[in-house]
Image (cartoon, helix red, strand yellow):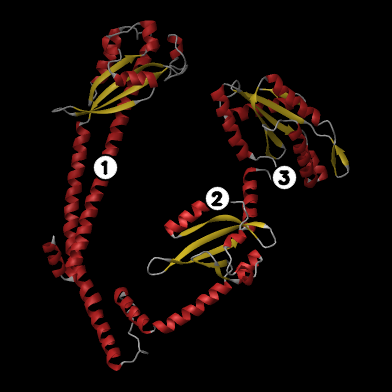
Amino acid sequence: MNRISKKWHALGVQEKLHILIQGSLIVLFFLSMDWVIARFEDQIMTSAELRAEETADGLINGMNMLMLTGTISIPENRKLLLNKMQQSEGIKELRIIRGDSVVAQFGKGLPEEQALDEMDREVLKTGKVRFVRIDVPGGPPLLRVVVPFIAQENYRGTNCLSCHTAEAGSVNGAASVIIDLSKDEAMLQSVKNWLWAGHIAIQIFLSIIISWFVRVLIVRNIAEPVKKLQAAMAEIQRENDLSKRADVDENNPDIGEMARSFNTLVGNLELATDRLELFGKMFHGSGEAILIANANGDIVAVNPAFTEITGYPAMEVLGKNPRILSSGKQTPDFYQTMWASINEAGQWQGEIWNRRKSGEVYPEWLSIGVVKNQRGEVINYISLFADITERKAAEQKIEFLAHYDALTKLPNRALFADRLKLALISAGRNEKKVALLFLDLDKFKGINDTMGHLAGDILLQSVATRLKSCVRESDTICRQGGDEFMILLPDAESAADVENVAQKIIAAMTTPHQIEGKDLIVTFSVGIAIFPEDAGDSEGLVKCADDAMYRAKEKGRNNYQFY
């Protein structure tokens, strides 16, 4: 190891740079080759899986044709179909597998039509397609796919449920296909050969370019600029004039940085003074509050922004612990976590509630950092914080507007859609019902046209208030838009309970609304849809309720209709 290290140090900069670049390129090429080959392998295997699955689908369609012609029960017909399809290039084996429901009604069939292995049984049980690659020693690589038959009213043009007794959605059987991957493997090997040939050609070309580039880089950008910098330093040393500076070569960042470092060393004292003055201006002029404490946690300095935010003058807090600002809203666990981060990582930042001198509690964004000496000992804690009261209020307003209607303060479409989706999931899991009411104000446009949109908005607010009085806390009312509303009744016990809610809404609208000194009576056309009887998903349920609402309008408005 020492011998290698000595040889490495004995090399010139040009040789070292050349070796490092070449080595990096070689590693990069090997990594890229692995990545590209992996992508080709994935693509080829995906294509093979698709081909196998399409073959299985073809077999399923063939069996469906036998079913339609009434000849599927004849074993020779099924064998003829399998033999004919197996003659296609690349297909090693085709097999049809009977499910339990088919066996129970029509018998086990041919021996090869029974589940022969765990893969067959798993597909019959789960109803999911399975792929597996088979590598036979001394033989071609193979891919096997097993595709299930699903019993449905209309499955690939046939009515599975009309032929035998089976539950819709159950697995009638499966198709097993084994295809030969020899051509795919040959294609992959050809791709690998071309990639390696291209890699070698590019590597040779880059070696020539890099050799030339390294020589130009060393001579023009390092050797010559270093000589100029050495001459400038020698002149400063000879004349002992610290007011002079070495010229900075902006065209050569490395040499330029050396010149800048030398100039910085010469003017260190002046720069330190300027920095102290700058830090003082930043401390006093910062818009964020700054608090500096010593290693014991006692406050040693605060800036004017601290006084402006907390109300404490500097003289009242110097020598005291920052705990005087504590609001009491944070738990001991909060402070334990905060100090664990400060002690381990040297910093912490986050949101915290503190108290002003007046006693007002306010939110602030606080950052705490640790200053240590050269021995690693803590000498100061520096805290920066800002009052985020206005920002928190703005965030709450944005959060409200994102989920609620600004006019009626009811949940908007997005929030209602989330609650409806969750209600359907819960109802499906617990085998309960969910009711959806779609409400449309009758002839609302006439009120807008005659009294103006402001009166219409006031009326919508009054209507929303009455709707709230007609439902439970657990129910959700949404303003769908314009004069349309929707009501979600989770855990609906019966149609009668839903009908009671609809009757309450119709009755609540009989009392006039006081709008701009006038009594206005408005009515609702209400459509009702029930999950799971009317629809099995949220989109379907909304459509059913909408259709029912339009039927309510057709029946004269001011009434409710079930889907």
- Judge the density around disc 2: few (<14), some (14-19), many (≥20) Cα neighbours within 10 Å: few
Question: Residue under circle 3?
Answer: 407
Left or right: 219 in relation to 530: left
Query: The residue under label 3 is which amino acid type?
Result: Leu
- Judge the density around disc 3: few (<14), some (14-19), many (≥20) Cα neighbours within 10 Å: few
Q: Looking at this view, name the residue that lies furthest to the left.
A: 3
Measure the C-alpha gap from mark 3 to mark 2: 42 Å
Mark nearer the N terminus (1 vs 2): 1
Mark nearer the N terminus (3 vs 2): 2
Q: Residue at x 56, y 28 (%)?
A: 426
Query: The residue under label 2 is which amino acid type?
Result: Pro
Tell me the quarter of the image containing the C terminus: top right
Above/below status of 335 relative to 299: above
Measure the C-alpha gap from mark 3 to mark 1: 57 Å
Question: Residue under circle 2?
Answer: 332
Front-most of residues 48 and 431: 431
Image position, residue 463 (x, y; %): 77, 37
